[in-house]
Amino acid sequence: MMPVLDAWQRRLVVVAWITYASFYLGRVNLSTAIPSLQADLDFSKSQVGLFATGHFAMYALGSLINGRLGDRLSPRLFVTVGLLASAGLNLAFGLSSLWGVLFVVWTANGYVQSMGWGPVLRTLANWLGPVQRQRVSGVFGTSFVAGNAVTWLLTGWLVIAFGWRSAFLIPALLLVGFAFSWFLQVRDRPKEQAGNEVESLPTEPQPGGEGFLTGLSRSLRRYWLLALGSFFAGPLYIFFTIWTPTYFVEVGGLEIARASSLAALLPLVGIGGIVLTGLLINRYLVGREVLALASVLGILALLFAVYPLLEFDLLRSALIFFLLSALVYGITNLFLATMPLSLGRRGETSSVAGLLDFSFSIGGALSGVLIGAVLDTFSWTVAFSVLAATALIAALIVFRSQTA
């Protein structure tokens, strides 16, 4: 039976969950602001799109760098600086009007936003034993789904009520509050918290005085197959976040408002997928997480291949999309939370998280161009075939990684 979390550990997990969710206040707020921002400043879609490109590319690079730094520096301080820096950059974005300034600011924001995930997982690893980490990892990914959904709701209302600039100015203030909450409530390790009741954790090797590149190289050698699998899994997640409304408009004939409402349900379904896969693994597959991940990817490959062969029916298609979305969010959590917490030692959790997040983000970024080109040149059926192929490749790579 899995050991329960004591009071200090439960508090740490809750604060970590809320803190990482808060990062999204300064990350996905651009999505809801784009239509109003574009009209107000007379920017083209290409100009606005470059904001996201710069942000996403820098986030991916930052994940690799900051994942490693998160294992060498204080995660308590690292996350605090990331939140405060993102708050400052959101404030600058909300007060600016020149395209060049906005591009530089939002690209820089991509880098500081990457200071959250790896160090937060490192803090969890420091406070939890191996089996407890497994238990928490099954649901911790709901933080980024919830943060995304809450940010869209809040900033959507702000844009309507006060204009697009408020979607950056108000989140900037909230990020400052969350930064101080994290700094005041969290300690890097249990021994730094006077009077805590955490039982002593098993001693695990910690990184020594090795250099940045040496440690990064060690993580790459150990987890390169998982990183490659993460690269091929990234397109599956990006497909649902970008193309779902367009699919139901073009194939289903829905109006954009109805299609967008349908797409907005996907994060809620995604939370269910994360929780369900986590519970199944914790109950039946502890110690076989990699095999479970490969199996879910294989199921996804089959569903993506079969789905376009069915005649479109709104109810059936929506239900299958929900199932696909639940599984995709589930494998996203397995890659980005379960793998670092289950496989990485406490001294390298942040590095593993950064490496997998980097690979996932790069794969997702490249797929935006790939899927768009496929849709322009061929059809939705071909696009689903591409997704089936990437899921199958990811499944084979992940399966191979457990025998390497």
Image (cartoon, rainbow, N blue to C red):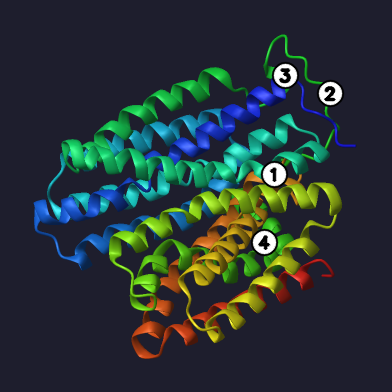
Q: Amino acid at mark 2?
A: Ser
Q: Which residue is mark 3?
A: 7
Taking 299 as reference, is 170 left or right?
left
Quadrant occupied by the N terminus: top right
Q: Position of residue 143 (x, y in %)?
A: 55, 41
- For the image, the number of numbered tags is 4
Q: Secondary structure at mark 4?
A: helix
Q: CA distance from mark 1 to mark 3?
A: 18 Å
Task: Specify whether 341 is left or right of 186.
Answer: right
* Residue at which label 2 appears: 200
Q: Which mark is residue 137?
A: 1
Tell me the mark number nearer the camera, choosing from 1 and 2: 1
N-term-proximal mark, 3 vs 2 = 3
Characterize the local packing of mark 4: few (<14), some (14-19) or many (20 or more) Cα atoms within 10 angstroms. Answer: some
Q: Which amino acid is tagged 4?
A: Leu
What residue did someone put label 4 on?
A: 220
User: Earlier along the polypeptide chain: callout 1 or callout 3?
Assistant: 3
